Amino acid sequence: MEVKFNILNRQFEKHQNEYETAALKVLRSGWYILGDQGKLFEEEFATWNQAKFCIGLNSGLDALTLAVKSLGIGDGDEVILPANTYIATVLAVTNNKAIPIFVEPDEYYNMDVRQIEKVITNRTKAILVVHLYGQIADMIQIQAIAKKHGLYLIEDCAQSHGAMLKGKKAGTFGDVGCFSFFPTKNLGAFGDGGAVVTNNESIAETVKMLRNYGSKVKYLNEIEGANSRLDEMQASLLRVKLEHIEEINSERKNIAYQYIAQIKNDIVQLPKLSHSKEGHVFHLFVIRTKDREELQRHLKEHGIETQIHYPVPPHLANCYKRLNYKIGSFPITEMYANELLSLPIYYGMKSDEINWVISVINKF
Ligand SMILES: *Cc1c(COP(=O)(O)O)cnc(C)c1O
């Protein structure tokens, strides 16, 4: 039996007619950038998150980069962020010439709240928190730290669409929440896409200008902007997918709970929930083991594809040699990078595939 890491066709096929109708409507409309579909998606995504504003953008990286920029963070400013994250989180800081200040992860793989205050200096401008693998970070405590020190709070929600804490969605605890709609994400488009949500009108206005060459009125360029618009095709397809997001998230959770209940192997450490069940939407199902290479090979021999998120932590990436970090700078992050393994989990995954993953791991 073969189990792929992800099969994106499955989610398309589940609602194929709806996607095809939406796509044709855009093709026939003759309007492809900044139109009705984009506006409607922004309204619907803002409402779903219980946020006042949403601005559709080109990617998750742009959402993060423009969010940092909209807060006036730049040259020499410090931004505190997790060491255990995808490189995009860090690029958003360095794209703005600001300095990333890394914090080690806790046992839930999110930023360890106890380490944040130790690295605050008089150059610190913001905390950029990531809800990694779909699990919401400790936002109540992080909010309190940000408030106490007068820091902006930015959320990287690229993996956590719909994760909740105390009835509030990830992305609405800070000044601005940043989303990716890369096809594999819980709310994935059929191409690139991203968005920010915020309750702050001036951040919303600034990001709206930044995404369109820094202009409100065509050819009147107020600030140095970018081209980062969510196109009409992606917006209309995302509107369809947003109608099914609860089903998508609950299916992912069900797969995760089956793994948690049924994987029984002493060499494997399963993910833990840091809050209630609504706090984790399982973008990824990440286990930890000292025998990763052998387990990955064993799974592959039995037809099961796995991935590693992420094999090289950003502070050790070649592109950040100038930051002068070495092996041992962030030992917990580095240990995780050597031990983490992501199992297949996706909308449309079949029960015989789930059961095969479980039984192959249990026999290792
Ligand atoms: C995917 C991802 C991003 C970047 O999103 P893109 O749309 O690919 O630019 C940023 N942060 C995290 C944590 C991600 O997983």
Image (spheres, rainbow, N blue to C red):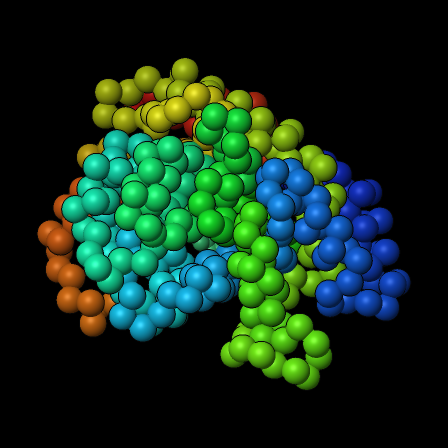
Residue occupying image coordinates x 42% and y 51%: 154
Count every numbered label the image shows and give the total: 0
Q: Residue 289's spot in the image, x, y percent?
A: 24, 33
Give coordinates of residue 224: x percent, y percent.
52, 79
Q: Decide: is 105 above or below 209.
A: above
110 versus 21 height, above or below: above
Residue sitting at 44 percent across and 45 percent down? 174
Horizontal side, residue 281 vs residue 138: left or right: right
Residue toward you, 25 or 355: 25
Task: State left or right for residue 330 relative to residue 253.
Answer: left
Q: Is residue 139 left or right of residue 66?
A: left
Does the image show residue 108?
Answer: yes
- In the image, residue 37 sits, relative to residue 263, either above or below, namely below
For residue 155, side relative to residue 97 (left or right): right
- Outermost residue, bottom direction? 219
Picture quarter containing residue 146?
Answer: top left
95 or 221, which lies in front?
221
The residue at the point 43 percent across, 21 percent down is 276
Furthest toward the right, the residue is 28
What is the x, y in percent for residue 304?
44, 36
- Check the picture and name the quadrant holding the C terminus: top left
Q: Pinpoint residue 61: horizontal percent, then vertical percent.
A: 47, 60
Q: Residue at x 60, y 62 (%)?
A: 205
Q: Is residue 299 visible?
A: no
